Image (cartoon, rainbow, N blue to C red):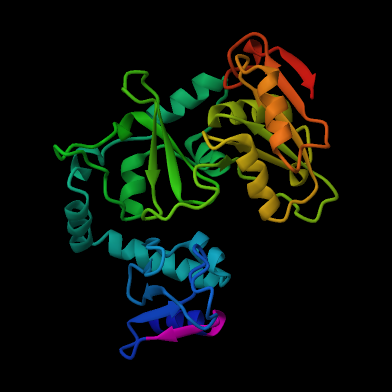
Amino acid sequence: MDTEDIRKLILTSKKPSYQTTNHKEVRVRCPYCGDSKKDKTHAHMYIEMTPPFKFYCQKCTTAGVLNTQTLRDLGIFNSDLSSSIIEANKSIKTSTNQKTVINRRNPVLNRIESASSVNAVNYFNARFGTSFTNEEIVDKFKAITNAAQFFADNYIRVPLDVYNRPQYDFINAIGFLSSDGTHVIFRDITGQQKKRYFNLDLSGGELTTSSKLYNIKSAVDILSDEITLVMTEGIFDIIGVYQNFYKDKVDETKYIFAAAAGKGYNAVISHYIRMGFLNLNVIIYSDNDVDTYFFKEMKQDSVYLKNSPLTIYYNTLDKDFGVPADRIKVKRVII
């Protein structure tokens, strides 16, 4: 499929859609900000029709390189279209000229582009007592084990401080993509950085209500009679909970595994209700230094939880659940 075929397929698959007179851009409604609320014929997201196929919304400033997930978000996913765009983008990125552009846009990329994912994978497996490959961690847990490659693949500028240095040691960190794809939550794997976490905003400053929430990848069936929402505060906690209590033991089409990542448990519940999961059974695995009084107040503040039982689990052997199975002993509290 050549560029002209790609242009025609996008135009015919997405309505409303428009093209510039020189056919170099296609304009569609933005799926991230909802675009114009007053006039449904208005469209503010521009997609360049030459590789790399970049997009930019004039309304919310969300920008990036067109990929499979973006096509799904636009509601125009087509396997031939997706593979053609990916191949075209790859061919550009491997050219000498494009490498120059990437390095110019990312002034410190040359210093970190040799980073491998080995340290991040070793840290992950040592933390949970597992033996995942890099591919398994990246796919199942939406992880970014090689920040340099991630920046290059997605044309992202390395965040710099006032001294033109990276704001964070991305080489020695593992990242996780947020539920809505607007953030990457990086976690230090050395214990030596001033900040354990660094939130990289990919949205261009347009925050959404689900920003920084995290969920483990699963094929949840929204039509199920009841969905169990399993929550923790931190990302490593939900991974530990999933590994030790649910993996290969439950029907994952009926479960959502999510971490609040600093946004609060009620924000997670509200997010999934807005997505159409109206019958949620809520379970929280909490840090053991959080008193049950906190959850009683949280329940009272939630329209959804106020009249339903809330199950809380504590780990009595360690502070939280982001640890191997031999460091977990569960205590249950029902509120």
Q: Is residue 166 left or right of residue 273?
A: left
Q: Is residue 229 above or below residue 36?
A: above
Q: Is any part of residue 89 visible from this angle? A: yes
Task: Look at the image and tell me in which quarter the C terminus lies.
Answer: top right
Residue 194: x and y, percent?
Answer: 31, 22
Kindly indicate the quadrant of the structure image that contains residue 140: top right
Residue 209: x and y, percent?
Answer: 54, 50
Q: Is residue 69 left or right of residue 288?
A: left
- Tell which of 23 and 291 is nearer to you: 291
Q: Is residue 309 above or below residue 2?
A: above
Task: Look at the image and tell me in which quarter the N terminus lies.
Answer: bottom left
The residue sitting at 58% across, 14% down in the picture is 319
Residues drawn in magenta? 12-19
The residue sitting at 68% across, 31% down in the picture is 298
Q: Is residue 124 above or below residue 98?
A: above
Residue 292: x and y, percent?
Answer: 70, 19
Residue 213: x and y, percent?
Answer: 55, 42
Which residue reaches farthest right? 225
- Tell which of 88 and 199 is nearer to you: 199
How many numbered dots are placed on residues in this image? 0
Q: Is residue 13 magenta?
A: yes
Which residue reaches farthest bottom? 21
Kindly indicate the quadrant of the structure image that contains residue 322: top right
Q: Is residue 142 left or right of residue 118?
A: right
Q: Is any part of residue 1 visible from this angle? A: no
Which residue reaches farthest top? 317
Q: Is residue 315 magenta?
A: no
- Tell which of 149 and 41 is nearer to you: 41
Which residue reaches farthest left? 163
Q: Is residue 66 left or right of residue 9?
A: left
